[in-house]
Amino acid sequence: MVSKLKMDIRINLGSAWTFLVLVGLCSARFHQVDISNLVQDTEPELNHTDMNTYVKTWLTQVYNPAAQLVTQADSETQWDYNVNITDDNQEATLLVSAQSANFTRVMATQLKKFDLNASDATIKRLHKKITELGIAALPDDDIREINKIIADMTAVFSTAGVCMNEAITDPKACPKADFMPLDPNITNFLRESRDTRKLRYIWKAWRDATGAKMRKNFIRYVAIKNKAAKLNGYADSGVSWRANYAEPALNYTDTDVLRDLEGLWQQIRPLYMDLHAYVRRKLMEKYPTENIRKDGPIPGHLLGNMWGQSWEGVLNFTQLFPDKPKIDVTDEMKRQNYTVDRMFRLSEQFQTNIGLKPMPPVFWNASMFERPEGREVVCHASAWDFYRNSEVRIKMCTDINMQDLITIHHEMGHIQYFLQYENQLMPFREGANSGFHEAVGDTLALSVSTPRHLASIGLLKDDKSDPETDLNFMYSTALEKIVFLPFGYIMDRYRYDVFSGKITSDRLNAGWWDYVKKYQGIAPPVERSEKDFDPGSKYHIAADVEYMRYFVSFVIQFQLHKALCNASGHTGPLYQCDINGSKAAGKLLGDMLSLGSSQPWPIAFEAVTGTRKMDAGALLEFFEPLTRHLQAINAKNGDRPGWTIHKDDF
Ligand code: X8Z
Ligand code: ZN
């Protein structure tokens, strides 16, 4: 028995070795890794008679180091493409993805050969993660095609812009001085401009430059994604995305996931409708010529954001108490000559103050914090794990304003998660579910953006807590957090329907607007048709990023915040809590993060919050005084929350 095992492990090592040599050709970084150690180190460990112990050895000594190398190569080439969009860099990503798929297949086949004792929950979990092939289930041609489609759609999105000279219809002929990229130019313009004609022009021009150009590619993308999902045993790609939230070990099924997500939305919907009615009234007053109906949806170009996913852009003229502090510290940051570096250091400081890990030196050296000159990059902010020696990076085209300060906290949350779970085996080096990964930084930012905290770091002069300032704070937070929820929900409700075939390829745009109108209460400001593909004007659709993670995050971050506040000894209303400096809160959070995905998410969640269930109760508690206030204003103005859709709402 022992000698047979010995032989097996040599064979396994042999195939891993051959494979690594292949991949090594594609990435110079591999030459730094001494793979021979891998073989030698395993030899003394082979004295096992029981299969589970043997598999554990295989996992730690064969699979894990090899998976690390392959994933590093993948991250490396993806990074290179994201910070320099060229054909050569794209080709490198396609080559490494092909190798990576090969590796996935080899390892899955290997692991399937072992006769496992299924009673070990951890092995069972690892087995599932390693044997599920994902995209590697596809034939090589399909893998190349889908990866190329995604890289191309990402490039279309990331290099797009709007020509501010409206006389020029061909964007390629746009003089450089008139060409506005999304970040930061268009984003800032939408937030600041009140010129409705220009806003309408940009709203349409952006969709012409992005979504419309990827419609054909997207249809093919859906077909290949579904083929992969079916090969993995799922009905379609939507079910395979939702598998990230299902937990078979706890009998938590796809049906439960769908039911719970809808239940969360139903909990939140009344508050969104109150907010919508209040903002609609303010917009009617501000833009009397825009024909906004008292009982209608809001035209999408007036909300200060390209997709109407957060409405901080309208804060200036909608604030509840204009004479009280408005809690947007952008002006103060500019006045104090804030630098991008200082913004990142501030976020790190908050993490270390509660006992979390500091950023390693490589983070500061290798990240891309600003848009570089002279090359095309993917500006949409992201955090990267390179799976070796704590190597982590952020890529972001940072601007000096409060929204970007919050986004930095969001991204640094991802990085903290990477660092906390780095000692787990590779399949567990991910969030408890994807929503958890998105929630870490946001949870901390809920403390950072309280008036008291902003005052403590010198960004707000007057932090005297009075009910009106508190309501201003809750209102500006709601413009980010509550407004986001219907958008966060429909992005994938829409894609679930596309993947399942409920929305057919001849209704791709109409199907999108059915959702936007119904859930967000937003209408397009110009007529749309099936020549358009408006979902593709959003990064995550172009780049194939599952989006329900953000909906989940925006709910659970309030549950996590409440739990950390309790641990920190906070008393008083939830919206006033700042966990700054609380080692108890940091420990509670850090312990959960260090689990990665080694436990079912409800178990990890319970350890912090005391419950296994996602619930919007903490969120509603946070905004409770605001809810009452908005209801009173709406009633006084005779405004009924809600909207009806007419034919001429396009
Ligand atoms: O994409 C992001 C992050 C990167 S994971 C900046 N977010 C979503 C978005 O921008 O649409 C954060 C909130 C929602
Ligand atoms: Zn994120």
Image (cartoon, rainbow, N blue to C red):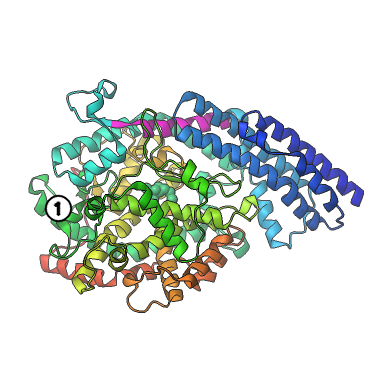
The region drawn magenta spans 142-161
Compared with residue 302, is residue 613 higher up or lower down, i.e. above or below?
A: below
Compared with residue 92, is residue 131 higher up or lower down, i.e. above or below?
A: below
Residue 82 pos. (x, y %): 46, 35
Nearer-the-camera pick, 112 or 415: 415
The residue under label 1 is: 283
Nearer-the-camera pick, 256 or 623: 623
Decide if residue 634 is on the left or right side of residue 368.
Answer: left
Decide if residue 591 is on the left or right side of residue 576.
Answer: right
What residue is at 38 percent from the left and 34 percent from the top?
A: 372
Confirm or reject: label 1 Cβ below 8 Å from ligand 1. no
Compared with residue 370, is residue 317 higher up or lower down, i.e. above or below?
A: below
What is the crowding at mark 1: few (fewer than 14 residues within 10 Å), some, or many (at least 20)?
Answer: many
Residue 581 pos. (x, y %): 43, 69
Secondary structure mostly taken by the magenta-highlighted segment of the chain: helix
What residue is at 19 percent from the left and 57 percent from the top?
A: 279
What residue is at 63 percent from the left and 55 percent from the top?
A: 423
Judging from the image, what secondary structure is the residue with disc 1 in? Answer: helix
The question of residue 250 being in magenta is answered with no
The question of residue 159 being in magenta is answered with yes
